[in-house]
Image: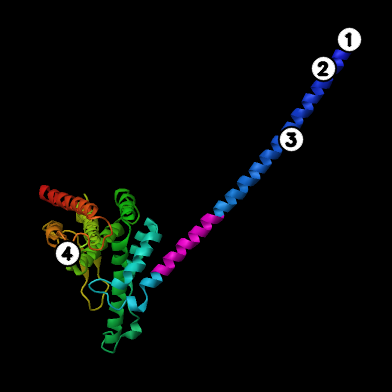
Amino acid sequence: MKTNFTFILLASLTLIACKAEKAMDNTNKMLKTTEAMNSKMEQTNAGIESTNESVRLQKLILSKDDMLKDENTRNLEPVALGMIPGAKKFGEAATTTELVEFTYLLLKEINDQKPDESDRLENGEYKPEVIAAYDHIKMIKFSELITIAGMAPEEKVDQIIQEQIYGGGLYQEEAYAFLMGRVMFLGTYLDSGILSRPLNTVERMNEAITRLGSIDNILKMPFKNEVKMNVTGFLKRDAIAVSAYAEDGTLDALWNMPKLWKKVLKAFDRDLKDGNIVRGSSSSQKEVSAKIASMKRRVEAYIKLWEIK
């Protein structure tokens, strides 16, 4: 009996060991399969990331090319309207570092590049056509700078402030210039476009408030007196030396926020009056009226903050 029991016990232990070994083999196979799957997924993700980055870089190139099309660079003042679609796409595709790096490069090209000496006349002056072409090219670069700054997404502007200004970044001075370009572009864009016609639809009013809000945020920053830009690289054109606040603390008419907010507030009664509030909207009059009331409260809040200031 003892021999039989021992035999049975050994047989059972052998069977258990075989099952355990088989289970371990299966586990190892599963682990190898899982590792292979993970490796393939990592390769796939890396491929997707590489593709996404290629697409992003392509967007940057195409949007910049669009800004610099001949038809978009002829009329640059008061703002280069033809550059706006390309600038908007560029700002969406660019990283915050790329935005301030590009600002640095454009400022350097404007201020430092000079015509070839062979283009001088015998009296030492540059040929008139050289001067005209040279200054126009510089203005194209300047328009690029301020249009990109003006149309950049708000969240990226906030990120540039955090990284470069509060974070003491490599491009802190260029960040100030970028913000000045944004104020300058939006102020001019509003004056010559949005605010030059009736704000008689909800979207027009919302656009005006959003753009003015972007300027307002910059003009209330603790570092507001550092927001400035100095462009001196022209041959005949005057240098562009501009700051958010003048030395006496006054604001330029294009971004005098207390006056502009009051102008917008008047437009609620003048342009969005009864009988006109549903123009351009498929929503019910009640919903539109609620939106208008909300926007009006926002404007009143901005005005109150300037009065407290």
What's the mark number on residue 9?
2
Q: Secondary structure at mark 2?
A: helix
Q: Position of residue 284 (x, y in %)?
A: 25, 55
- The reply to whether callout 2 and callout 3 are in contact (CB within 8 Å) is no
Considering the whole magenta stretch, tell me its main secondary structure. Answer: helix
Q: Mark 2 belongs to which amino acid?
A: Leu
Mark 3 and mark 4 residues within 8 Å of each other at the beta carbon? no
Task: State if disc 4 and disc 1 touch (CB < 8 Å).
Answer: no
- In the image, is 199 to the left or to the right of 81? left
Instruction: Give the mark nearest the N terminus, 2 or 3.
Output: 2
Which label number is shown at residue 25?
Answer: 3
- First-in-chain label (1 vs 4): 1
At label 3, the amino acid type is: Asp
Q: Amino acid at mark 4?
A: Leu
| Lower sequence index among marks 2 and 4 | 2
Distance from disc 2 to disc 4, alpha carbons, whole Å, reads 96 Å
In the rendered image, residue 266, in percent from the top left (x then y), is placed at 11, 59
Amino acid type indicated by mark 1: Met
State the image coordinates of residue 177 (x, y, percent, origin top left).
27, 61
Residue placed under numbered mark 4 in the picture? 254
Q: Which residue is mark 1?
A: 1
| Distance from the alpha carbon under mark 3 to that under mark 4 | 76 Å
Which range of residues does the magenta coloring cover? Answer: 47-63
Q: CA distance from mark 3 to mark 1?
A: 36 Å
User: Which secondary structure, mark 3?
Assistant: helix
Disc 4 crowd, CA 10 A, few/some/many (<14, 14-19, 20+): some
Q: Nearer the viewer, residue 301 or 222?
A: 301
Which numbered disc flags the more N-terminal residue, 3 or 4?
3
Q: For the residues carrying marks 2 and 4, which lies nearer the camera in this image? A: 2
Q: Is residue 81 magenta?
A: no
Asked which secondary structure carries label 4, the reply is helix
Q: Name the residue located 28 percent from the left edge and 71 percent from the top edge.
A: 81
